[in-house]
Image (spheres, rainbow, N blue to C red):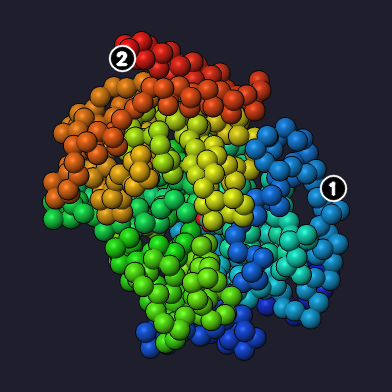
Amino acid sequence: MSTPLESWVEESARLTKPAKIVWCDGSVAENDRLTDEMLRDGTFIELNQRTYPRCYLHRSNPNDVARTEGLTFICTREKETAGPTNNWMAPSEAKEKIRPLFDGAMKGRTMYVVPYIMGPVNSPYSKIGVEITDSAYVAASMRIMSRMGKAALDRLGGSDDFVPGLHSLGDLNPERRFIMHFPEEKLIWSVGSGYGGNALLGKKCFALRIASWMARDQGWMAEHMLILGLEDPSGKVTYMAAAFPSACGKTNLAMMVSALESQGYRVWTIGDDIAWMHVAEDGTLRAINPEAGFFGVAPGTNAKTNPNVMAALRHDTIFTNVGLTQSGEPWWEGMDPEPPAGLIDWNGRQWSAPNGAAAHPNSRYTVPASHSPSLSSRWEDPAGVPISALIFGGRRARLAPLVYEARDWQHGVFVGATMASETTAAATGAVGVSRRDPMAMLPFCGYNMADYFGHWLAMGPKLKNPPKVFHVNWFRRSADGKFLWPGYGENVRVLKWMLDRIEGRAGANDTPIGCVPTPNSLTLDGLSISRDTLAELLAVNSSDWSEEEQAVGQFFNKFDGRLPAPLRQEHASLGGRLSRSSVATK
Ligand code: OXD
Ligand code: MN
């Protein structure tokens, strides 16, 4: 008798007709074999093995370099279940459309069966997925990004408790590219793309879209959040989780070298992209990082912005769509002030400035978390770490102050639900356009966002001491377009203010949007920042916020009657506070 997994593999093979099937065990020997094959067929280019041992460069098809949100669907029986912010297709229609694209797609190719665990091997919160793929690059990347191979098969046994994901590169034609999710049957079908977020199915497809659905049903949370621990001078570590949209600095914050290290404040990394959070028996919110590696944006990464990751990616790392130096090393914009001579760009052409960027703006490194010098000793704690603060943030040139604190859980949900950010190169489409991205989950929520807000609201009362909720904006600019805040390692000063708030030590001014630090409550020693700049960073401008309040109303209208009433109430209360404060300041 075949197991449910064997039956699904057989069924997928009948459809895709591969020349051979390889069951991945995740071993070093297997990884060496895959690497050799990819070096032979050109999928991998060897980097300088002296300075970057076991590191390789992969160049993807130039039309396949980012997540394609327009081709990503939530396929539920009812359109309403997917909601107004997702692309929707009925499951039967989606399957009819995609099945022919899978039919014979693996002819002459190898089918890799990639079993994996999302989460620590022995955590009760972890879950199993199995990806079938015809891409060796995907199989090798999944080995870095998850606990892949034998450990997953051992945990699964003969059970059917896994999320199946069928992936084929297809012909890489965007006309025939679809990323389909069937949350009602916990199934993923992805065809026509080899790019990370579209093709490494454990990440966005399972750990966010399908998992958010499971989390709603089972009473936990699957969020687009980094997890970090802030150590204080006494050695106590306070854990925080933060949601920022793609390419807004989650990895840098999670791995930061603290500017307050000499005062005893250090940051420890648990995860850089996804948090699965459960209510523990003691009423705390406990977070695990379901991933095992970092799939980070390369451009802008350097010894100042993220020294820990620069150290981490010097061995056993896959680079995708970065530039290549004459000495066979990876290179991207922002790595050094000047590009080295003789660079090859991400398309494999001799680079010169008029050709555009040497590295694609969404070029990536795929590196095991275990390489990071900042990795927390608790990063694989099966019980997760207790979360004391949840942080939302986006890129906003104007409007949002450096940091503010929500009044309570319900207001915090409103702050997360109304977050907005300027778009980045992590997804195809225009860059720099402001859009609402609730909880940074707009592209990743597997069901109706109004119901997702309802789920957030329902989680608060289940927690004994709900985490405090904050909003940050590292990206506020002056009238002449300059960033007001230095960011990176200096962001620890904001984390420290949050810690002081959690412990009841720091001062704040109550404003219509929430509590903003008093200038003296931020630890600014060693940083040269003028009082005027600080005032600009912390300013809450009532007329700008009134415009924002109107825009939020329009956004909420998308959800019609489905929007939870407490969010309407929070919206009305904000309006009331803003009009009272503008009367008061007149
Ligand atoms: C990612 C993304 O790759 O959010 O993490 O796009
Ligand atoms: Mn992400």
Judging depth in this view, the residue of 574 and 10 nearest the camera is 574
Judging depth in this view, the residue of 14 and 196 nearest the camera is 196
For the point 18% across and 41% down, the residue is: 530
Position of the C terminus by quadrant: top left
Judging depth in this view, the residue of 82 and 119 nearest the camera is 82
**Residue type at tag 2:** Thr
Q: Position of residue 570 (x, y in %)?
A: 47, 20
Residue 93, numbered label: 1
For the point 54% across and 44% down, the residue is: 433
For the point 59% across and 29% down, the residue is: 555
Give left or right: position of 296 versus 583.
right
Q: Secondary structure at mark 1?
A: helix
Looking at the image, residue 124 lies above or below residue 561: below
Q: Quick one: label 1, few (<14), some, or many (20+) residues within 10 Å?
A: few
Position of the N terminus by quadrant: bottom right
Judging depth in this view, the residue of 217 and 193 nearest the camera is 193
Find disc 2 in the rendering and name its residue. 585
Disc 1/disc 2 C-alpha distance (Å)? 57 Å
Q: Position of residue 384 (x, y in %)?
A: 39, 49
Q: Are marks 1 and 2 in contact (CB under 8 Å)?
A: no
For the point 71% across and 43% down, the residue is: 87
**Residue type at tag 1:** Glu
